[in-house]
Amino acid sequence: MTPLGNILIRRIEASGPISLADYMAECLMHPRHGYYQRERVFGSDGDFITAPEVSQMFGETLGLWLADRWMAMGRPNVVHLIELGPGRGTLMADILRACARVPGFQEAAHIHFVETSKQLRALQKQKVPTARWHDDLSTLPAGPALFVANEFFDALPIHQFEKRDGKWFERSVGAADSELGFVLTQPGSQFALVPQHLLAAQDGGVLEVCPAALSATASIADHLKAHGGAALFIDYGYATSAPGDTFQALEKHDYTDPFKKPGKADLTAHVAFDRIAEAAAQAGVSPSGIGEQGTFLMGIGLGLRAQKLAEGMEAKEQGRILGELKRLTAPDEMGTLFKVLAIQNPVLSPAPGLPPFTSA
Ligand code: SAH
């Protein structure tokens, strides 16, 4: 067992099972043993690779989307450009490079990173020295804002509930014989967040809720409503909530048992985009429809960017760019599993590249 595993086992033995959300939060964010306190998390030598690490074209294309929204906002002199969970800082560096060609944008943009990991903050500082860091959304300054988050929501802790003999239980984390694993307990208060229509699920059905995703969305929506602006969220997940277990652990690009090595494997869950869009609409901002990454990126100019980049390059380099384009957009790669959602102050024109919102 890992050092964090032993800490958790002792805690559970002393005071009973903990929620899956507590378990995820400890494994990912523990100040000493948490997964994100390590540097080698992303990239080919890490446990998983994210879109900004696949290709510079990802961030460059998103940068132009953000600059377009800044223009739609009337080119405010100051715009807070806020990234949630910036990882190695690659996405923001690529965004800023692409936006250097948009007159006035770089001068207007004040960069903010919301990041809990000290180790990752150090990497981010190397790539984007001018950023300001925040532990959470509560310390962001007032003013017009553009938010961007890639693979942030999937790292937020979830609760799971399971139906047994017609009754709902919470899937909590217990300990026995120095091992951690699921135990069923009475549902906690977060059970109230489950959409009513899903409660009719069959026996054995699993439902998930992510309170942290809903509260982050509500904070962002409040900011956009009060100060103007837009937010763009990209993550793997689903457009329509349904029963299903999406909790997973990844280590060295392979799925692994989420209870075997607490703190050493990445733990995630698929993002329920319909719930996030609903939470935004309830808070009085305008969600877009939920798009797919491949269609979205091609719709806002990724193909053109690739062509431009490839011009004048050697055949081998052109092949690499084509490979990256495919990785980001092909249906059997990141193109359809990854979804895209924008939420905006209602005065803005519709978000480019995304379908219109339709309520469930
Ligand atoms: N966006 C990056 C990294 C994704 S990994 C990329 O696409 O490559 C998730 C990131 O979110 C990491 O930087 C992690 O430290 C951060 N993170 C996870 N949970 C967080 C939380 N609750 N608050 C702030 N940052 C968080």
Image (cartoon, rainbow, N blue to C red):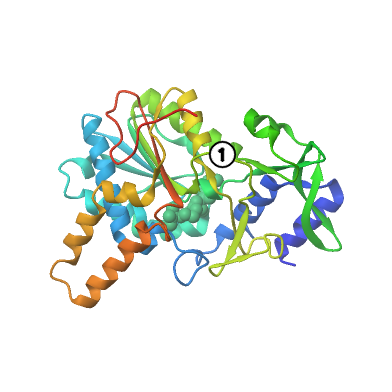
How packed mark 1 is, by other alpha carbons closer than 10 Å (few <14, some 14-19, many 20 or more), is: some
Q: Say left or right for 270 vs 306.
A: right
Q: Does the residue labelled 1 lie within 8 Å of ligand 1?
A: no
Q: Is residue 11 above or below residue 353?
A: below
What residue is at 57 percent from the left and 46 percent from the top? 156
Q: Residue furthest left?
A: 312
Q: Which of 136 and 65 is in front in this view?
A: 65
Q: In this view, does 238 lie above or below 220?
A: below
Q: Say left or right for 163 vs 83.
A: right
Image spot of residue 225 (x, y percent)? 39, 24
| Quadrant occupied by the N terminus | bottom right
Q: Can residue 290 be seen from the camera position used here?
A: yes
Q: What element carries label 1?
A: loop
Image spot of residue 251 (x, y percent)? 58, 67
Write down the quadrant of residue 87 in the picture: bottom left
Image spot of residue 43 (x, y percent)? 44, 67
Instruction: Count all numbered tags in the image, as a single digit.
Output: 1
Q: Can residue 190 be seen from the camera position used here?
A: no
Write down the quadrant of residue 341 in the picture: top left
What residue is at 47 percent from the left and 33 percent from the top? 277
Question: In this figure, which residue is indicated by the disc labeled 1?
Answer: 241
Q: Say left or right for 253 vs 301.
A: right
Identity, as a three-letter code, of the amino acid under mark 1: Ser
What residue is at 69 percent from the left and 51 percent from the top? 23
Image spot of residue 178 (x, y percent)? 83, 63
What residue is at 23 percent from the left and 50 percent from the top? 301
